[in-house]
Amino acid sequence: MNFSIPTVEDIVTKYQAVELDNPEQAKAELMKLNKDELVERLIQATSHRSGTVQELAKAILQDEELIAANYETIADAIKVMMPTAKTSSKSIASYVSKKREEWELPPRIRIATQRPKKVPEPEAEAEAPEAEA
């Protein structure tokens, strides 16, 4: 399976409420759907909306498409969607630690990324030359 690390923008795009540009056109499209299709669209539209930081964190953490997102990215995405939230990577880690079984969270994956190589600093004259007498 090939995973990529989700960005804050990826999470926000998926979970932020969609604003309708043309409500009449949206209504016309919805009227064409059969009952089952309409129910499915309604469930999808409402399943991502959350009232609290905890509910939003739960939805993101349960999303199997986002299992490669790190806690810092999740916290940053929540702060974008809920500007008054004081969410941090530590609060996300706390939710995972305390609610893992209750929320039935999928296992997280870590994708190895190359760390920038440290360039050794040139040593300032390894040893000062001894003064000649």
Image (cartoon, rainbow, N blue to C red):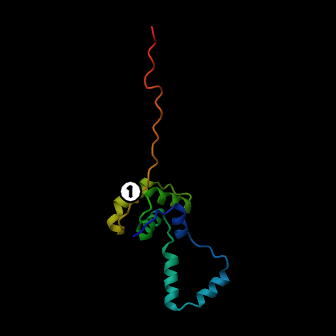
83 left or right, relative to 101: right
115 left or right, relative to 25: left
- Of all residues, the one furthest to the front in this rendering is 132
Quadrant where the N terminus sits is bottom left
Residue 65 lies in quadrant: bottom left
Q: Nearer the viewer, residue 86 or 2?
A: 2
Q: What residue did someone put label 1 on?
A: 94
Q: Residue 60: where, in percent of width, then height?
A: 45, 66
- Of all residues, the one furthest to the left in this rendering is 101
Residue 19's place in the image compared with 32, above or below, is above
Q: Residues within 10 Å of mark 1 (few under 14, many from 20)?
A: few
Q: Residue 2: where, in percent of width, then height?
A: 42, 68
Quadrant where the C terminus sits is top left
* Callout 1: SS: helix
Q: Nearer the viewer, residue 20 or 120?
A: 120
Residue 75's place in the image compared with 55, above or below, is above
